[in-house]
Image: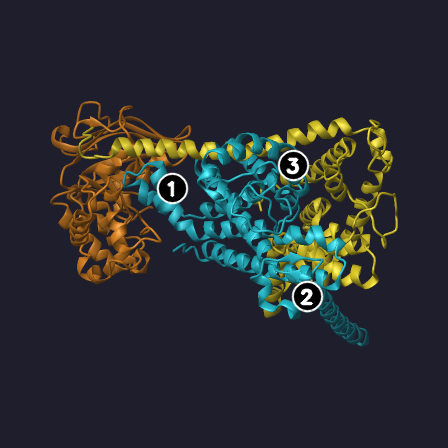
Amino acid sequence: MAQAIVGRRYRRRVLVNRLMLVLTVLATVISLVPLVLILVYVAEQGIGSLSIDFLTHTFRPISFGTTSTGGGVLHAIVGTVIITGFALLLAVPIGIMAGVYLSEYPGNAASTAIRFCVDVLSAMPSIVVGVTAYVLIVQRVKSFSGFAGSVALVVLMVPIITRTTEEILRLVPQTSREAAIALGAPKWRTTLTIVLPMALSGIATGVLLAFARAAGETAPLLVTVLGNNNLTYDLFGPMQALPLLAYRYTEQPYTVLNQQAWGAAFLLVVIVLGINILVRIVTRPRSHR
Amino acid sequence: MRTEISADSRRIRLGRQLQHGDLIFWIVALLFAVLVVVLLGAIIAVTWSGSADARHAFGWHFLTTTAWNPVSGQFGALPAIYGTIVSSIIALLFAAPLGVMIAIFLNSLCPAKLRMPIGMMVELLAAIPSVVYGMWGIFVFIPFFRSYISTPLSKTVGSALPLFSGPVNVGRGLLVAGIILAIMILPTIAAISRDVLAVVPNSQREAMLALGATRWEVIRHAELPYARAGIVGGMMLGLGRALGETMAATMVIGNTPKIHASLFQPATTAASLIASQLPNANTDLHSSALIYLALVLFLITLVANSIARALVWRVSRTGSGA
Amino acid sequence: MTATAANPNIQMPPAIDAHLVLDGLTIYYGSREAVARTDLAIPRARVTAIIGPSGCGKSTLLRSLNRMHETVPGGRAEGRVLLDGANIYDPSVDPIHVRRRIGMVFQQPNPLRARTIAENVSIGLELDGIGRREKEAAVERALKRAALWDEVADRLDRPGTALSGGQQQRLCLARALAVEPELILMDEPASALDPIATLRIEELIRELMTEITIVIVTHNMQQAARVSDYTMFMNLNERGSGGVVEAGPTQMIFTAPKSKQTEDYITGRFG
């Protein structure tokens, strides 16, 4: 073909095209490198420190020179389960009902305002939430507590649950609702017996994601739960949690504790990524956010 | 006849009960929904009232003074605000171009089979707990950074450019924090950019293709301009996330409330200053100043996120990216 | 046409001075045959219309003439399309060159959003680099040829999307004209427009025809009769792919169609 017509800059254009396309591939690869490095490193360090003792013992005091790998993180596992479990107990009803309201009564001023608040909450820095729980609870009762941590986590979980619930309920076909209402069922019964059950797996997804997010949160716990070297079931005193322990032990000069920090980090990553991968595979057809 | 009447009246009574049921359901749902508003209201009210001492003591000077001394009761937030903004901007400088490139790759170049796994892997970066990023930063990235980046840079460019001057032996500092934050906000930017690029109508692409544009020219002249507002929105959302991120910053930035010219020196962010000092705050003024700082941080992220949402909304709803 | 033309109902002018020659062109999407083997010639500086019921491959055939169908995943072609004797499907040919010489106007006006009127016109030239003064002149020339200059001369820096539908379509025509193509393909260019805007587009087609070869897809037979010199009638064959049933001078197709299918279609008995 007559090259002369097209182009003075043809060569350059083709070159720029190639270059940019290669750059996008390169950017993607570069971005995945840290993910791989982090996962490999966490697995490498973490698996090594896993043992029966690690899972069944609590903190054991260490002095310089000891090489024993004694002690474990049972107290942190228990703490994480209690704190996030209690938070889940509070966050699930609030989140789901708010989501139901937003999807079943949309378009009024209240739902617009509530949706705005959900958006603001979901973008709230977790440390600010932690500070609030600190002022509201820790300062009042003059004691750090697992309870204050739970309250902070509730605030972080609710927007995730609300949003997923709303999105999922929107996907329930309007015809299903109309069919039930045409049969004479009132709205509340339609919602509770038809709409919600149809959306159950989607809502469970939201709850799981919220749990994963909360389980990995450290900052709000740092200023509310504080940390505790002993095993405790008392929600109203200082507790330990996995992410908190990982942070504290990392800052310690003892290699033994550093290793345990990696063990805790490994547990966290397995839980959090496990949930995320599971959720993404189950809900694949949906858009990715 | 009588039975029919009673059946009728029963139906009416039932109808009323049903209406009551709906009313109760509406009220209950609304109450829970309003609880969300209450949560937000509580955060604002608590940080406002909790910071009263510090606000009265320092007023606006809090934002412009640099002394942070719990012992003498001097609290100026400028170093923390400076560290927060500079580390977040560094993060954005790294993450924004990478994130957009990933979005372009996933949206228009990636083979269909790889789209889902690669997209998922990028998003998994967002799910890793931030404390793990912090640990990786301390044990892996900082030693690497000190050997291969900060030491050579400070020895060469550093003598002329204060931005890159030494000493670098601490390891923890602004630039390291910025890079770790970049990894953390990358998925946000990539995901939003990908979403808005996906809504670019095919007719826009065809307009360029029919003129004899290369693949890149289609992206450059049709897709990116159309999605520009949304992409900028994604960057702002990423910025918002970097501004409020606590643990990774706390662990790798060095927690020193001072302003240094060099990016290799330890600094602090608002979030990390709060996280590291609030549990140990001895005086009321100290904790009040930290709560004041939380309030400031909240407002900064609120502004960034509001702008972001407005921009993303404009592209995905009205489709006018102008 | 050469002897390979299996279809005796195709009576286009001889290939010898045709602008485009379709030589055994077959179009596929994946493994599905979208348009069956076609052999015919498209004459220079004339308007050729493609008519037929919807879904019969009109747009696909049109898009294969500047390789736009390849931008859809799975889109490919076999056979040859000769532009002034050179095969645009030759492996050594970059589709960029083809599309630069054979422009296209789409069904829905698609001015680039976030670009001004002037930028919309000049974008094709900018790809190859162009001086500012040269550009202004080219923009004016293209807008005048598209009969839009008088309406937009005072607001060239407004967004292209601020224009009315008919104006937007003429803007897209100006955009295609700006790079000085030899051929323009139009895919139902007036179907989204009101009658008056449609009329203006048709007038433009008749004016442009003196210098440019035009191929236009339309489902509107009156439009085909009004604007075209030659007409191709396409229909689905028994295998479910589209194919050219009959082609020839418009006058002949509409008054004395050879094929029963063509006659049924133009008399409105189906489709």
- What residue is disc 1 on? B219
Q: Is residue B4 above or below residue A220?
A: below
- What residue is disc 3 on? B138
Residue that appears at 32% across and 38% down? C235
**Which quadrant is the C terminus of chain B positioned in?**
bottom left
Q: Are marks 2 and 3 in contact (CB under 8 Å)?
A: no
Specify few, some or many for label 1: CA neighbours under 10 Å numbering under 14, 14-19, or 20 or more: some
- Going from the N terminus, do you reach mark 2 or mark 1 first? 2
Q: Are marks 2 and 1 in contact (CB under 8 Å)?
A: no
Residue A49: quarter of image? top right
Cα–Cα gap, marks 2 and 1: 49 Å
Q: Amino acid at mark 2?
A: Ser
Q: Chain of mark 2?
A: B
Q: Which chain is yellow?
A: A
* Residue C101 picture location, percent across and down: 21, 37
Q: Amino acid at mark 3?
A: Ile
Label 1: which secondary element? helix
- Going from the N terminus, do you reach mark 2 or mark 3 first? 2
- What residue is disc 2 on? B51
